[in-house]
Image (cartoon, helix red, strand yellow):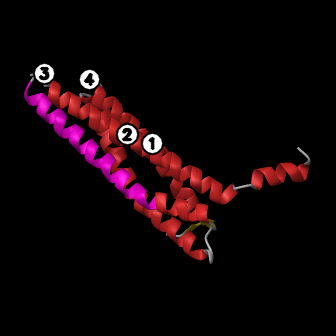
């Protein structure tokens, strides 16, 4: 899907990923660091959001590649945006793996009430690493994308309007 209602599909899909990936990362951090959060519905919401993010990321990337291919000579910042965006599928996959891991951890915790400090520390390190890196990657992709579209346009408009 490359065009939706005469708009490039990428411009629409990316907003889902921009919201869902950081939200999923944040929820995974909460579920990973705070055991009571794993016991309720928040864990299942996190798993569903991770799955939706994993599905929407390649769709968004494909729509972006279609736009990129329309350019005869893509600018360096657009090439950077495309490279960073292409890597997002790995971050989305990591979010899904962590969400599945948190569900497995919850199932193990239901079977035993033993406190397992090592598993909690490992869980904390993994959810923080994946969550924070995913949020940083989304920011980096978005920044390069905004620069490729808007670049010096705001400064040019201000200058043209005498602001």
Q: Which residue is mark 3?
A: 115
- Do tag 4 and tag 3 residues touch (Cβ < 8 Å)? no
37 versus 150 height, above or below: above
Classified by dominant secondary structure, the portion drawn in magenta counts as helix
Q: Nearer the viewer, residue 25 or 3?
A: 25
- Do tag 1 and tag 4 residues touch (Cβ < 8 Å)? no
The residue sitting at the right extreme is 162
Is disc 2 placed on a helix, strand or loop? Answer: helix
137 versus 65 height, above or below: above
Residue pictured at 51% horizontal, 57% vertical: 13
Q: CA distance from mark 1 to mark 4?
A: 24 Å
Q: CA distance from mark 3 to mark 1?
A: 30 Å
Residue pictured at 28% horizontal, 38% vertical: 126
| In this rendering, position of residue 21 left or right of residue 82 | left
The part of the chain drawn in magenta is 85-112
Q: Position of residue 54 (x, y in %)?
A: 36, 54
Is disc 3 placed on a helix, strand or loop? Answer: loop
Q: Position of residue 46 (x, y in %)?
A: 33, 39
Q: Nearer the viewer, residue 60 or 119?
A: 119
Is disc 1 placed on a helix, strand or loop? Answer: helix
> Which mark is first along the chain, 4 or 2?
4
- Magenta region includes residue 86: yes
Binning the other alpha carbons within 10 Å of mark 2 as few (below 14), some (14 to 19) or many (20 upward) gives many
- Do tag 1 and tag 2 residues touch (Cβ < 8 Å)? yes
> Which mark is first along the chain, 3 or 4?
4
Q: Position of residue 37 (x, y in %)?
A: 29, 27
Q: Which residue is mark 2?
A: 131
Say which of marks 4 and 3 sits in front.
Answer: 3
Q: Which residue is mark 4?
A: 36
Q: Is residue 60 visible?
A: no
């Amino acid at each position: 899907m490359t065009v939706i209602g005469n708009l490039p599909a990428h411009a629409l899909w990316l907003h889902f990923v921009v919201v869902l990936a950081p939200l999923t990362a944040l929820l995974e951090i909460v579920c990973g660091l705070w055991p009571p959060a794993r016991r309720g519905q928040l864990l299942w919401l996190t798993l569903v959001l991770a799955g939706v993010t994993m599905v929407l990321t390649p769709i968004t990337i494909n729509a972006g590649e279609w736009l990129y291919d329309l350019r005869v000579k893509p600018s360096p910042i657009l090439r950077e945006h495309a490279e960073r965006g292409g890597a997002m599928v790995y971050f989305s996959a990591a979010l899904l793996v962590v969400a599945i891991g948190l569900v497995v951890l919850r199932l193990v915790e239901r079977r035993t009430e033993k406190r397992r400090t090592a598993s909690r520390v490992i869980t904390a390190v993994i959810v923080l690493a994946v969550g924070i890196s995913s949020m940083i990657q989304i920011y980096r992709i978005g920044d390069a994308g905004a620069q490729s579209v808007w670049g010096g346009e705001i400064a040019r408009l201000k200058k043209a309007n005498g602001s």
